[in-house]
């Protein structure tokens, strides 16, 4: 296992199990011209699930790019779902009432890995499309965590 974090006296050992693209949705019908200023908004969804039999925790990042987000009818250009699996030793010890209870630091580590992986996979996917000039903007993992707190984990154990 590559990393160790503490949770209420338990050692959290984990490593990356796999990284893969789960889904891709690209709308080529939207009028979009490279190098032309158009307001673009990026929304990032977060989802997670786990498999206690394999001790794998899955984190999915779902960036969606919209053109003219302030208009009456913004158009979604594309959306990609990237899933990162983390093999967590004794995962069952970090689950209460079917919810993960990871330390905040571990969530931020997972988000950091997820953001970098998603940025690279997105660039690869979009390279052959008219959206090749769009990249995932810089994202501070802690801000993403704080903004999506309710989506990520309702039972975060804060470090004392």
Image: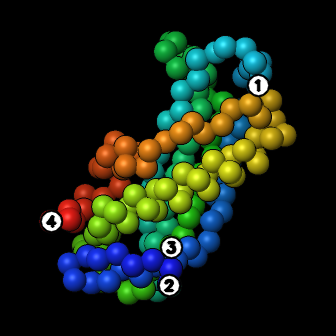
| 91 vs 75: above or below | below
Eye-nearest disc, 1 or 3: 3
Secondary structure category for the residue under label 1: loop
N-terminal of the pair, mark 3 or mark 4, is 3
Q: CA distance from mark 3 to mark 2?
A: 10 Å
Q: Quadrant of residue 35?
A: top right
Q: CA distance from mark 4 to mark 2?
A: 25 Å
Residue sitting at x 68%, y 46%: 122
How is colour applied across the structure in the image?
Answer: rainbow
Q: CA distance from mark 1 to mark 2?
A: 46 Å
Measured as percent of width and height from the top left, residue 110 is found at: 46, 62
Provide the residue designation for mark 4: 160
Residue sitting at x 38%, y 87%: 90
Provide the residue designation for mark 3: 86
Q: CA distance from mark 3 to mark 4?
A: 25 Å
Provide the residue designation for mark 2: 1
Secondary structure category for the residue under label 4: loop
Eye-nearest disc, 1 or 2: 2
Eye-nearest disc, 3 or 4: 4
Measured as percent of width and height from the top left, residue 129 is found at: 81, 35
């Amino acid at each position: 296992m590559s990393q160790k974090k503490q949770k209420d006296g338990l050692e959290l050992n984990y490593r990356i199990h796999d990284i893969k693209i789960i889904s891709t949705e690209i709308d080529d019908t939207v009028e979009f011209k490279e190098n032309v200023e158009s307001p673009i908004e990026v929304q990032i969804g977060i989802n997670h699930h786990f498999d206690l039999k394999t001790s794998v925790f899955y984190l999915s990042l779902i960036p969606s790019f919209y053109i003219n987000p302030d208009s009456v009818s913004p158009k979604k250009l594309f959306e990609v779902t990237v899933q990162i699996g983390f093999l967590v030793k004794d995962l069952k010890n970090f689950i209460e009432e079917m919810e993960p209870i990871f330390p905040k630091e571990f969530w931020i580590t997972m988000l950091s890995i997820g953001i970098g992986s998603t940025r690279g996979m997105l660039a690869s996917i979009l390279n052959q499309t008219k959206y090749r000039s769009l990249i995932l903007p810089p994202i501070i993992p802690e801000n993403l965590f704080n903004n999506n707190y309710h989506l990520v984990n309702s039972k975060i154990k804060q470090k004392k």
